[in-house]
Amino acid sequence: MKIGIVCYPTFGGSGVVATELGLELSKRGHEIHFITYSQPVRLELLSKNVHFHEVHVPEYPLFLYQPYELALSSKLVDMVKLHGIELLHVHYAIPHAYAAYMAQQMLMDEGVLIPIVTTLHGTDITLVGSHPFYKPAVTFSINKSDAVTSVSASLKEDTMRLFNIKRDIQVIPNFIDLEKYNHNFTDCQREMMAANDERIITHISNFREVKRIPDVIKIFYNIQKELPAKLMMVGEGPEKEAAELLVEELGISNRVVFFGKSHEIDRILCFSDLFLLPSKTESFGLAALEAMASSVPVISTNTGGLSEVNEDGFSGFLSDVGDVKEMSENAVKILLDVDTLNQFKANAKAQSQKFDLRNIVPMYEAIYEETLKSFMVH
């Protein structure tokens, strides 16, 4: 199959998943065309089955904001005709599904038929889509797609509640390549970060308000009162400065390491004992899954898709948003005893197996085939 993939080429979950999906599909013999404004961050290798087409947005003094959707639609039309692309898989309802629909209509005028599969990732629904200003465009884009998937059952429910959706939405969870988490280094150099008797707790995010960074620090503050521990804070974002001040106020600066953005996530997870994700909302919880794949149990909230990823009492524990006391107690429950900790680590790894890309990618292939078949009939 010749598949065009449209996504954001950034570090965010949707861009990573779209890129990993394209790479795995290419290994399975499909011809993949990434169409976006810059090369996706995880698209290391361009092989004979993987192609990248950059969308250029020309500067027009007439426009206050340059029209990306227009440029993307035109690029999609050109690429479909040039490479014989058979199906478009777009990640995010707007602007991508919106631009894909325009391209589909332009191509139809020229006698070229191409179906659109849209994957909803979360922010396009919860943040952008529910804004009254964008609601009609999002509803239209979803209803005009030929197949729609969402990364969690929770996100599907949100979409059905917020919009007047006439389409069936199929849940296909996010995934990771578990092979990449069989760490090839035998020693993570844990002793550089902590003493033998200290537990290492980790949080990785974009430090936005939705991640509830103060809760991460308060939970850790409670943990270190019960047992020797260090906290690894990985990431950059608007809440980082306030977090550093809170750490100072609580007098735990010597126990907390702020890494900023790191390209050594696998090494940090390798020496971690526990992962904290007390977010206000997560449409899926890819960070939690990546931690579990590295055998790190997770203390998280039960919001959004997190309860579909983190199994309460098995791979970690779930609590209500803001329940710092319960999250702290659950963390200590896991960390206090070595045997309990090792059991939770093994369980976290086992839970992550369900989301291996080799189990998930065939679900996308089935949707492509089904969509192509029914589209051609119509």
Image: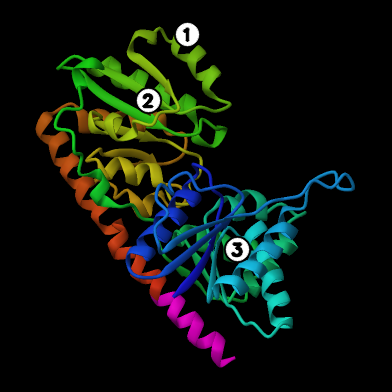
Name the amino acid, label 3.
Answer: Arg
Q: Where's residue 335, x and y in %?
A: 20, 29
Which element is circle 2 on? helix
Question: What is the C-alpha distance between the residues marked 2 and 1?
Answer: 15 Å
Q: Where's residue 30, x and y in %?
A: 40, 70
* Label whose residue precedes the other's in the sequence (3 or 1): 3
Left or right: 93 as drawn, with respect to 255: right
| Residue 316 seen in this snapshot | no
Name the residue that disc number 2 marks: 219
**Of 50 and 335, which appears nearest the observer?**
50
Question: What is the C-alpha distance between the residues marked 3 and 1?
Answer: 42 Å
Q: Residue at x 41, y 47 (%)?
A: 44
Q: Does the magenta segment cover residue 43?
A: no
Q: Which residues are magenta?
A: 366-378
- In which quarter of the view is residue 298 placed? top left
Name the residue that disc number 1 marks: 249
**Mark 2: few, some, or many residues within 10 Å (few <14, many ≥20)?**
many
**Mark 1: few, some, or many residues within 10 Å (few <14, many ≥20)?**
few
* Label whose residue precedes the other's in the sequence (2 or 1): 2
Name the residue that disc number 3 marks: 161
Question: What is the C-alpha distance between the residues marked 3 and 2?
Answer: 33 Å
Please determine whether, in this image, residue 262 is positioned above or below residue 51. above
Instruction: Name the quadrant of the N terminus.
Output: bottom left
Which element is circle 1 on? helix
Which element is circle 3 on? helix
